[in-house]
Image: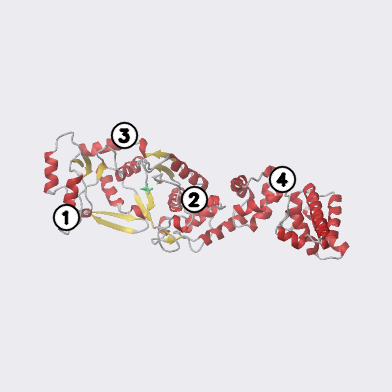
Amino acid sequence: MTVKTRFAPSPTGYLHVGGARTALYSWLYAKHQGGEFVLRIEDTDLERNSQEAVDAIMEGMTWLGLDWDEGPYFQTQRFDRYNQMVDKLLAEDKAYKCYASKELLDEVRAEQEANKEMPRYDADHPKIKAANAAAKEGDPCVIRFRNPKEGSVVFDDQIRGRIEISNTQMDDLIIRRTDGAPTYNFCVVVDDWDMGITHVIRGEDHINNTPRQINIYHALGAPVPTFAHCAMILGDDGAKLSKRHGAVSVMQYRDMGYLPEALNNYLVRLGWSHGDQEIFSREEMVEFFSLNAISKSASAFNTDKLLWLNNHYMKTSAPEYVAEHLQWHLDQQGINKDNGPAITEVIALVAERCNTLVELAEQIRYFYEDFSEFDAGAAKKHLRGVAKEPLELALAKVEALNEWTTESLHQMIADVCAELEIGMGKIGMPLRVAVTGGGQSPSVDAVMQLVGKARCVARIQMALAYIAEREANA
Ligand code: GLU
């Protein structure tokens, strides 16, 4: 049997990190088992669903690298199939027409509450029976599923263990509304059956639907999949994670400069563990993932840990991978990577100093763009009269350099120090400010090598002009 899992979001907004974790777990389980992963868009709520939300979900999934083997399927395109199955249950008397009006149902409910009974739909209530007996063919009605009256539904949740719910706690669910639309719990069952889903991995908020759905599987003669319900994600105050705790949309994390591998690694560990390992490559996640190592208890979202993981991936990822995800930020910040050294070389030099891609893009602008001003604080401190002679000597040596390598530049700086009998800082810092515009950068020889000779010459000249002007105004 091929394992098949699915992610079945309702397109009401962005891809939430909670949804992304469910998608990741479903994806990982399928990959771990050599199975397949299906994307299904549950878009039956026409008032709350939108094409933008569908696009946003797919964009988030694609960014995270959670590719689907089948789909996306859309529930709105499958109404005929659901109705066919409702009719089948009707024909087999496993479902029936119910003509009770809303007013009548409210009346019965009020009566039950007054009698301190659990308010529920009761097909045997005399008033409901009478209403159904009096109805004529063609009167408005809903279709209800005939839920078994006795016994219980038992299932072995892969995360929560054995769950048993008595049928007396379930009433006859509406499976088709008066307007002819099939309802959510019914569509999900028909879909999971038709799509050959073997494992349903979803949020705990759906656990109450599962026994009802299992009864429908039985009525349809469909095999019941295995279920796994994941606990919720909480904010730092213990309440369910929501917008007021900060960013909850996957694409917001892209915007803030996170790498998808860092977010995936963070999400996989948020409620799943493998010993005390924290860092997982994608291959390791696939290799080690199992449903029974998912925690039963809710997990709290911790932004500091996510940032720590991002820094780890910034430091250790292949520059090509970082470059792929940096591009969006370069575009955002208006940096053209064709105007300077190979971006992968710049990344190899600078990325380890940054926590996010936003920071990285900010820090590498000077490789690709000239600037007309130095950082005021850095210039004030390092572009002073004392720096004039070292910078002039460095300029002469730079102009005369035939070989433009980090080593030759390192030697050039050492020669300036030796000739002027000054310490490294007396030339290193002014050079850094001259070439980068600011006071912080990786090793100045390596930076100069990538910035290139022409730009270095022009920038040192600009620094000397700055010093001259400053002295003139003193
Ligand atoms: N469409 C449901 C949701 O977005 C998921 C249903 C399911 O996974 O069975 O919450």
Q: Which residue is mark 2?
A: 250
What label does residue 112 carry, if any?
1
3 or 1: tag closer to the N-terminus: 3
Q: Position of residue 76 (x, y in %)?
A: 36, 37
Write the residue at 55% across / 59% down: 307
Instruction: Indicate the secondary structure of the residue bearing disc 2.
Output: helix
What label does residue 80 carry, if any?
3
Gap between marks 4 and 3 measured at Cα: 58 Å
Q: Residues within 10 Å of mark 4 (few under 14, many from 20)?
A: some
Residue 140 shows in the view: yes
Q: Residue furthest right?
A: 419
Q: The disc labelled 2 sits on which kind of residue?
A: Val
Q: Nearer the viewer, mark 3 or mark 2?
A: 2
Gap between marks 1 and 2 measured at Cα: 45 Å
4 or 2: tag closer to the N-terminus: 2
What label does residue 240 carry, if any?
none
Instruction: Indicate the secondary structure of the residue bearing disc 4.
Output: loop
Q: Nearer the viewer, mark 1 or mark 2?
A: 1
Q: The disc labelled 4 sits on which kind of residue?
A: Gly
Q: Position of residue 121 (x, y in %)?
A: 20, 49
Where residue 432 sits, quadrant-wise, is: bottom right
- Quadrant showing the C terminus: bottom right
Q: Position of residue 408 (x, y in %)?
A: 81, 54
1 or 2: tag closer to the N-terminus: 1
Q: Residue furthest front?
A: 473
Gap between marks 3 and 1 measured at Cα: 37 Å
Q: The disc labelled 3 sits on which kind of residue?
A: Asp
1 or 4: tag closer to the N-terminus: 1
Q: Which residue is mark 4?
A: 340
